[in-house]
Image (tube, helix red, strand yellow):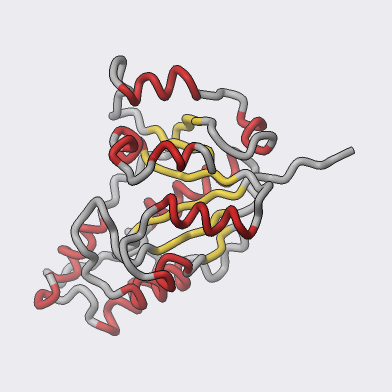
């Protein structure tokens, strides 16, 4: 009997810096959906926010340090190597060429999902991947509009279906709410405050050693 491929999770971001909010979200969704692994993809140039403070090389180095001992996570450098604006659809198509039959799923927070239809070629994203939306209780899903219609048309409640289809479904899953902000971390470090316990110790040590978020960079 043919054994369905397990879905691969994709978590992209600036990771400026990567912190426990990113990592806990990824780990909880990895476990909840029995994913093959999570691919963490630091972007080269974000298209929906200001340019990162840290360089692509620094953000990649921090991400590698953050997950060095976690076998469920893999680092993917494709967007940094590709350079230019980091569009999710370009990354998905690149991954799809390497694994035509693999189910891919984009992991996003509920705040990002509410703006999903502003993403570049968003319809094609759903033609090449599922969405797993990390739901937090302080956000409310819209009742009208295009996002509401997406939920009505594509919402799937059975988690195991993520492995049986290669694309097109939307899954909602509640996660532990960790109100950690990369912006706040950068500000704390610039002010000389201790940012420990907001991000992995080896990432924090790397930042302090390099002076990545000193006042002059903010």
In front here: 112 or 212?
Answer: 112
Q: Residue 136, percent across and down?
A: 36, 33
Locate residue 119 relative to residue 73 in the image: left or right.
left
Q: Residue 206, percent across and down?
A: 34, 79
Residue 215, picture quadrant: bottom left
Residue at the bottom extreme, as displayed: 209
Q: Residue 212, percent across and down?
A: 24, 77
Residue 144, picture quadrant: top left
The residue that appears at 43% across and 22% down in the rendered structure is 151
Residue at the right extreme, as displayed: 1
In front here: 75 or 87?
Answer: 87
Residue 63, picture quadrant: bottom left
Query: What count of labels does the image hold?
Result: 0
**Is residue 182 depicted above or below 9 in this figure?**
below
Locate residue 79 relative to residue 169 in the image: left or right.
left
**Is residue 101 depicted above or below 81 in this figure?**
above
**Is residue 77 depicted above or below 169 in this figure?**
below
Residue 126 makes an appearance in the image = yes
Locate residue 76 relative to residue 139 in the image: left or right.
right
In front here: 193 or 154?
Answer: 154
Residue 197 makes an appearance in the image = no
The residue that appears at 53% across and 59% down in the rendered structure is 94
The residue that appears at 45% across and 50% down in the rendered structure is 24
Locate residue 27 relative to residue 195 in the image: left or right.
right
Quarter holding the C terminus is: bottom left
Q: Residue 7, percent across and down?
A: 63, 45
Quarter holding the N terminus is: top right
């Amino acid at each position: 009997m043919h054994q369905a491929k397990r879905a691969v999770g994709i978590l992209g971001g600036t990771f400026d810096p990567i912190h426990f909010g990113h990592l806990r979200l990824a780990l909880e969704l990895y476990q909840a959906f029995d994913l093959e692994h999570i691919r963490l993809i630091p972007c080269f140039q974000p298209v929906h926010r200001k340019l990162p403070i840290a360089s692509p090389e620094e953000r990649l180095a921090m991400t590698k340090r953050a997950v060095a001992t976690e076998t469920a996570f893999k680092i993917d450098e494709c967007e940094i190597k590709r350079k230019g604006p980091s569009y999710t659809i370009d990354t998905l198509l690149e991954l799809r060429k390497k694994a035509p039959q693999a189910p891919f799923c984009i992991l996003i927070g509920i705040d990002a999902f509410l703006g999903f239809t502003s993403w570049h070629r968003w319809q094609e994203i759903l033609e090449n991947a599922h969405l797993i939306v990390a739901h937090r209780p302080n956000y409310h899903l819209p009742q009208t509009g295009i996002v509401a219609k997406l939920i009505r048309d594509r919402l799937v409640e059975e988690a195991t279906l993520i492995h049986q289809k290669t694309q097109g479904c939307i899954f909602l899953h509640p996660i532990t709410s960790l109100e950690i902000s990369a912006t706040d971390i950068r500000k704390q470090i610039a002010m000389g405050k201790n940012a420990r316990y907001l991000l992995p110790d080896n990432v924090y040590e790397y930042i302090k050693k390099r002076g990545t978020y000193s006042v002059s960079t903010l």
